[in-house]
């Protein structure tokens, strides 16, 4: 069984290969030039380009790249896509699948998430495969995690989120507010970003997130991930707060990929929880 994902899982192609997973890179576009995640540019260099005044946009993996992976392989394939609506990647993968006549062996899963939560799903799928679990059972087990997951974004720059088009209209209006800390989350259909709360400090914003995680019953049966767009010290502090409040829960720290920094903006913090 071949497992496929894209770099929105925060896996580079090399890291994916070590897991036995094929990773197609998402892309960031700067001044008309396309940069593939983790191949042509890393997050540190990407942030330097932004600091120098670059205004990037993002692009999902090219349909040709996905088609190349799908074609010429008769074994079962499991494609774990960034959430539909958060990117065009899912529709891209479905288009690639539907262009192949005999495609029953290709399974495209809308994970409804990205970043740390998607990273967990990919690792879970690889682990289950190594244990000899069949593809339908793997899909069922992944869905149990997908159905109990949540994501929060604390943006530092609303201009990036506005340009991405993934904000609801009301969320876009918040961008003009000063000296407030908005926390965003996914809409009920998981396809767009909408306000969760607005607080006057990062500490109060985190308290609101922690309160929601507690109401979900987050415990040792969950994984919490904290991702950052070049704000490692802030992210480490967030991790410590979460570990203090959820001592039995695994907390992971990641740097966002260049394409995902384009979504959330430099300095953004993403907090996610997903059931194991």
Image (spheres, grey):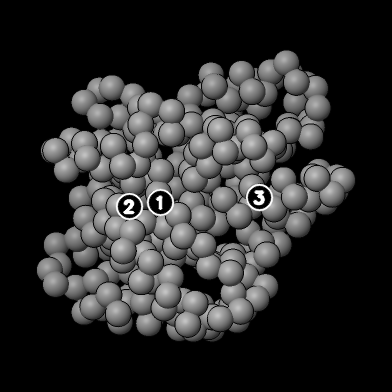
Q: Percent position (x, y) of residue 14?
A: 56, 33
Q: Percent position (x, y) of residue 245?
A: 49, 83
Circle 2 packing at 10 Å, graded few (<14), some (14-19), many (20+), is many
Q: Which mark is residue 255?
A: 1
> Left or right: where does residue 25 sit relative to residue 155?
right
* Residue visible at 32% across and 77% down in the picture: 205
Q: Secondary structure at mark 2?
A: loop
The mark that comes first in sequence, 1 or 2, is 2
Name the quarter where the C terminus is drawn: bottom right
Above or below, 25 against 271 in this view is above
* Residue visible at 50% across and 51% down in the picture: 114
Circle 3 packing at 10 Å, graded few (<14), some (14-19), many (20+), is some
Q: Is disc 1 in contact with disc 2, using a CB cutoff of under 8 Å? A: yes
Circle 1 packing at 10 Å, graded few (<14), some (14-19), many (20+), is many
The mark that comes first in sequence, 2 or 3, is 3
| Residue hosting label 2 | 229
> Left or right: where does residue 35 sit relative to residue 61?
left
The mark that comes first in sequence, 1 or 3, is 3
| Residue hosting label 3 | 123
**Is residue 90 visible from the viewing direction of this image?**
no
Residue 52 lies in what quarter of the image? top left
CA–CA distance in space, label 2 to label 3: 22 Å
Judge by depth and name the residue closer to the eye, 218 or 105.
Answer: 218
Q: Secondary structure at mark 1?
A: strand
> Left or right: where does residue 71 sit relative to residue 178?
right
Tag count: 3
Judge by depth and name the residue closer to the eye, 99 or 26.
Answer: 26
């Amino acid at each position: 069984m071949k497992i496929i994902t894209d770099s929105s899982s925060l896996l580079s192609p090399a890291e994916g290969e070590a897991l036995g997973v094929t990773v197609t890179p998402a892309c960031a576009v700067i001044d008309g030039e396309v940069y593939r995640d983790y191949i042509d540019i890393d997050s540190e260099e990407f942030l330097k380009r932004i600091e120098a005044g670059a205004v990037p946009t993002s692009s999902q993996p090219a349909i040709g790249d996905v088609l190349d992976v799908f074609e010429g392989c008769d074994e079962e394939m499991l494609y774990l896509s960034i959430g539909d609506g958060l990117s065009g990647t899912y529709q891209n993968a479905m288009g690639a699948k539907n262009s192949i006549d005999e495609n029953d062996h290709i399974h495209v899963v809308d994970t409804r998430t990205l970043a740390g939560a998607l990273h967990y799903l990919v690792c879970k799928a690889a682990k289950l495969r190594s244990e000899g679990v069949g593809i339908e059972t793997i899909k069922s087990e992944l869905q149990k995690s997908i159905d109990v997951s949540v994501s929060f974004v604390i943006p530092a720059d609303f201009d990036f989120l506005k340009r991405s088009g993934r904000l609801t209209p009301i969320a876009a209006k918040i961008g003009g507010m000063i000296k407030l800390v908005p926390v965003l989350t996914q809409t009920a259909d998981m396809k767009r970003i909408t306000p969760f709360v607005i607080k006057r400090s990062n500490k109060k914003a985190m308290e609101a997130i922690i309160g929601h995680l507690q109401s979900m019953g987050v415990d040792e049966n969950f994984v919490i991930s904290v991702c950052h767009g070049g704000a490692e010290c802030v992210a480490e502090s967030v991790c410590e707060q979460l570990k203090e409040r959820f001592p039995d829960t695994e907390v992971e720290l990641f740097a966002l990929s260049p394409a995902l920094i384009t979504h959330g903006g430099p300095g953004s913090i993403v907090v996610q929880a997903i059931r194991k």
